[in-house]
Image (cartoon, grey):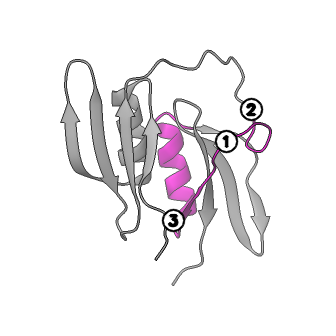
Amino acid sequence: MLFIGDIHIYVSDFTLALRFWSDGLGLSIAEKEISAHSGYVRLDFPDGGSSIRLLGPVDARDDSVLPMPGAAPAIHFDVTTGEFDEVLVRLIENGGQQLDEIETYNGLRHVTIADPDGNAFELLEIPDA
């Protein structure tokens, strides 16, 4: 058996990252440990699958310009949703950044989003079930 486990994301501002990932994507907090010096939370997707684990704080990047996905070594993943417009608005309202224009492929929309630390992923529309 082989599958993708949880996704670990190291963040510089734990409170902002938690707001982005939980409120922006609508993920639920399954585990949480926060002390004066560190934070950890496991966020679960509403329909199951891998979880997102936030860890931090770590030093913020000193990049003034974030490289576009594919321009530098990185790991990139998709977040799929049937509520594309609503999720995109929530992500931006909760500290996210839209990195490129919304494009359509095979009738479905997608766009690259960065979290407050510049960690990028693809928001991908899925057809209504």
Q: Secondary structure at mark 1?
A: loop
Residue 107: x, y in percent?
A: 75, 74
Name the mark nearer the viewer: 1 or 3: 1
Query: Which residue, given by chain and number where applicable, does mark 3 sit on?
Result: 83
Say whether disc 1 or disc 3 marks the residue closer to the N-terminus.
1
Q: Is residue 129 left or right of residue 127?
A: left
Q: Nearer the viewer, mark 1 or mark 2?
A: 1
Which mark, by number, is residue 74?
Answer: 1
Work out which residue is located at the far bottom of the displayed protein and give it: 129
Cα–Cα gap, marks 1 and 3: 27 Å
At horizontal 37% and vertical 61% (from top left) the residue drawn is 45
The residue sitting at the front extreme is 1
Please tell me whether residue 91 belongs to the stretch shown in magenta: yes
Residues under numbered marks 1 and 3 in contact, where contact means CB atoms less than 8 Å apart: no
Which structural element holds mark 3? loop
Say which label, 3 or 2, has the lower sequence index: 2
Closer to us: 77 or 20: 77
- Quick one: 117 or 53, which is closer to the camera? 53
Relative height, residue 82 to residue 100 (above, below): below
Looking at marks 1 and 2 on the same chain, the residue that comes earlier in the sequence is marked by 2
Give the answer, above or below, for where 112 lies relative to 57: below
Q: Which residue type does callout 3 highlight?
A: Glu
Which residue does the numbered mark 2 point to in the structure image?
67
Q: Which residues are magenta?
A: 68-96
Marks counted in the figure total 3
Closest to the observer, 6 or 104: 6
Residue type at numbered disc 2? Pro
Position in image of residue 13 (x %, y %): 40, 24
Q: Dot 2: within a 10 Å radius of its alpha carbon, few (fewer than 14), some, or many (20 or more) residues?
A: some
The answer to the question of whether label 1 and label 2 lie on touching residues, with beta carbons closer than 8 A, is yes
